[in-house]
Image (cartoon, rainbow, N blue to C red):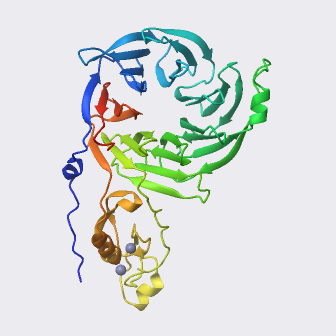
Amino acid sequence: MAAEIKPGPGLNDRFNTPKKPVLVSKLEGFSDDVNAALLIPGEDAVITASDDRTVRIWLRRDTGQYWPSVCHYMPSAATALFFSKGSRRLFVGQDSGVVSEFLVAEDRNRISHSKDYQAHTGRVTAVLLAESCQWLLSVARDKMFKLHCAQSGLCLGHFVSEAWCTAVAIDSLAKMIFVGDYAGHISTLKVDEAAAQSSIGNTGGVVSGVIRYVTNLKGHAGSVRALTWDSQNKFLYSGSFDQQVFCWDIGGQCGTAYELNGHQNKITAICYAPERRMLISGGEDSVVVFWDMKQSRLETPPWAESDMCQRCSRPFFWNLRAMMDQRQLGLRQHHCRSCGQAVCDKCSAPRHAIPSMGFEFDVRVCEPCYAQLKSAQQQSQTVFHEAKHVIVAMDVDEPQKRLLTVGQDHIVKIWDISAAMQ
Ligand SMILES: [Zn+2]
Ligand SMILES: [Zn+2]
């Protein structure tokens, strides 16, 4: 029986959801690219870093509009941000490779410079303070990951990657550090705590050897752009130019990794709301996707190797012998995304979304899998939203249910995501 091919949901249907985020405000007036922006949790305040060299703090006024209360000019382009609300310490990565630390006034109307970390010789791409251990982590286009003591300012160690470093995350409990790079690798590093501790009082200069290379998480076929650590479930999330989000089950220790396929262009930002267990991804397709991580997902199956179709037994084109014997033309090999079988085009004609495997778009499946998927009628819980600008960075404030998207259009948008978070 010929498979019935149901037209997949059009893009417009996908965005037609009652859970739509609502645009609350827009921050404008940048004369160059905005590289990073943060929501100060629980406050109507935003910090931005731009290629126009400004670091600005924006406060929401009575009119509902955001206006800068601070506009500080850096010596070079401001490329990365981290703010610790408790200690009011603000870290700014720069194009020059320097990471500058500021203290933000309680009323958010002033920032004062406290120190500089001569961390890198290339554009800083991410900076992060691990508060429990007072470690400042930074990565840059000089292919380096640097670990500094955020008390003494001393460099505790470094790691050299094969490509530009693009993202960093830390499991503060296990002292594991994840460094993403432009080649698609995620290097896993372990900090030798005893060595790091003993070097804190040391004023003698650079200490090396506290960082140990553990492994490389392989999977992405494009530059890693964002990394986020979920400390509760011990998952590492990575977003990549290969349009995929990978969920690495580090805590499970079985090498399991799930894929989330919901974008049709490069993923540039991911953030995580731990209470709601929601992962939010954004990309160059101008789309924000809200993934419910409470939903259980299956690993995608490995692709089978075969020299003939595993359904109709017709040979694939390199199987010359069977082609001669059966007097058949060789066929191209395809794979069913649901069961992983090697099949010909005819035996894998249907297309169906597989939300349980993170495939939110229609993908190639074989006929038995299609019948199964169709009868199961699995409802996708994933929310898609058109942000109407090409996203370069994002941040979420879960208690206030606010999402921030930074666009290539030099605009920062603030969204009310109450409905999406329900
Ligand atoms: Zn076949
Ligand atoms: Zn199948």
User: Which quadrant holds residue 169?
Assistant: top right
Judge from the rendering whether residue 59 lies leftward or rightward of residue 304; answer left or right: left
371 to 226, vertically: above or below: below
Q: Residue at x 62, y 49 (%)?
A: 216
Q: Residue at x 43, y 91 (%)?
A: 325
Q: Residue 93 at x, y = what percent?
A: 53, 22
User: Which quadrant holds residue 286?
Assistant: top left
The C terminus lies in quadrant = top left
Judge from the rendering whether residue 289 lies leftward or rightward of residue 271; answer left or right: left
387 to 111, vertically: above or below: below
> 65 or 143: nearer the eye?
65
Q: Residue 353 at x, y = what percent?
A: 31, 62
327 to 69, vertically: above or below: below
Q: Residue at x 37, y 10 (%)?
A: 69
Q: Residue 311 at x, y = what percent?
A: 38, 82
Q: Residue 214 at x, y = what percent?
A: 68, 47
166 to 57, vertically: above or below: below
Q: Residue at x 33, y 49 (%)?
A: 264
Q: Is residue 108 visible?
A: yes
- Marks counted in the figure total 0
Judge from the rendering whether residue 411 lies leftward or rightward of residue 160; answer left or right: left
Q: Is residue 162 visible?
A: no
